[in-house]
Amino acid sequence: MITYPFGVGSTRTRVLEAGKGEHALVFIHGLGARADRWRPNLDALASAGYRCYALDLPGHGFADKGSGFPYGVPGYAGFVGEFMERASIREAGLVGTSLGGHIAAYLACERPGPVRALVLVGSTGLARIGADARRAIGQNILDTTRDGIERKLKYVLSDQALITEEWVDEEYRINNSPGAGEAFTRLSEYATDEAGLDRDTVGPRLAGLAPPIPILLVWGADDAVVPLTVGEEARAAL
């Protein structure tokens, strides 16, 4: 696996790349996460013959932060699409988790040509979630205290043994790096606003694509963030 900085327009990000296969996969992380979440998947799928990429979304990880980016699903989908163009990825399977799945699905609806298939892992964005859930997401992203970050990791990860002191410390420093506060404030506003996250729901559009794109839904039976019932509803709708 290699890691390198990459420019997408005026925004700089960081890319993890593994494998030399003919077929490309682009991995998109969720809200408050970063490309490193995909490291075990990149190596495994590279060994299976795929060419794999994961990138930090603006406001996250080692990407540019601050208030100058159009934070939200449409802005992120445009960013991933432009990354694919600049990286000369003519077509790829998109793999997204949580908000990353929403971004992947939105990009597929806007620009289906380069999207070979979708793998949506515990994905948001397939149906409206309502004001209470949006408010909880908006408040959650703003908690970048060390205790808050540790609590969030324990909430989203099933295997608690994966959470080390070093990981919490690293996450704390990244999520409190220059510009992160401004980025998370903008994302919190986007999540909370009725004209934001729920407005950009893409389930019906995705179901109506012609020709249809192959879609794999991956869900954990004990997913506490996006429950299995959401996945079952999404499967029925698609």
Image (tube, rainbow, N blue to C red):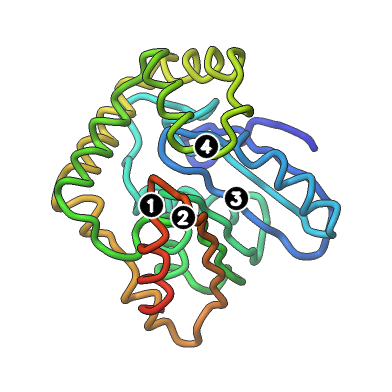
Vertical placement of 112 versus 123: above or below?
Answer: below
CB under 8 Å between callouts 1 and 2?
Answer: yes
The CA distance from mark 1 to mark 3 is 19 Å
Q: Few, some or many C-alpha atoms within 10 Å of disc 1 (few <14, some 14-19, many ≥20)?
A: some
The quadrant in which residue 39 appears is top right
Q: Earlier in the sequence, mark 1 or mark 3?
A: 3
The CA distance from mark 1 to mark 2 is 6 Å
Q: Which mark is residue 67?
A: none
Q: Few, some or many C-alpha atoms within 10 Å of disc 4 (few <14, some 14-19, many ≥20)?
A: some
- Residue 65 location (% of width, % of height): 41, 26
| Residue corresponding to mark 3 | 27
| Residue corresponding to mark 4 | 157
* SS at circle 2: loop
Give the side of residue 132 with respect to residue 186, left or right. Answer: left
* SS at circle 4: loop
**Residue mark closest to the camera, 3 vs 4:** 4
Q: Few, some or many C-alpha atoms within 10 Å of disc 2 (few <14, some 14-19, many ≥20)?
A: many
Give the side of residue 104 with respect to residue 1, left or right. Answer: left
Amino acid carrying label 3: it is Phe
CB under 8 Å between callouts 1 and 4?
Answer: no
Q: Which mark is residue 122?
A: 2
Screen quadrant of the N terminus? top right
The CA distance from mark 1 to mark 4 is 12 Å
**Residue mark closest to the camera, 2 vs 3:** 2
Residue appearing at x 18%, y 40% in the figure: 135
- Residue 58 location (% of width, % of height): 45, 35
- Residue 90 location (% of width, % of height): 66, 65
Give the side of residue 91 with respect to residue 30, left or right. Answer: right
Give the side of residue 52 with respect to residue 167, left or right. Answer: right
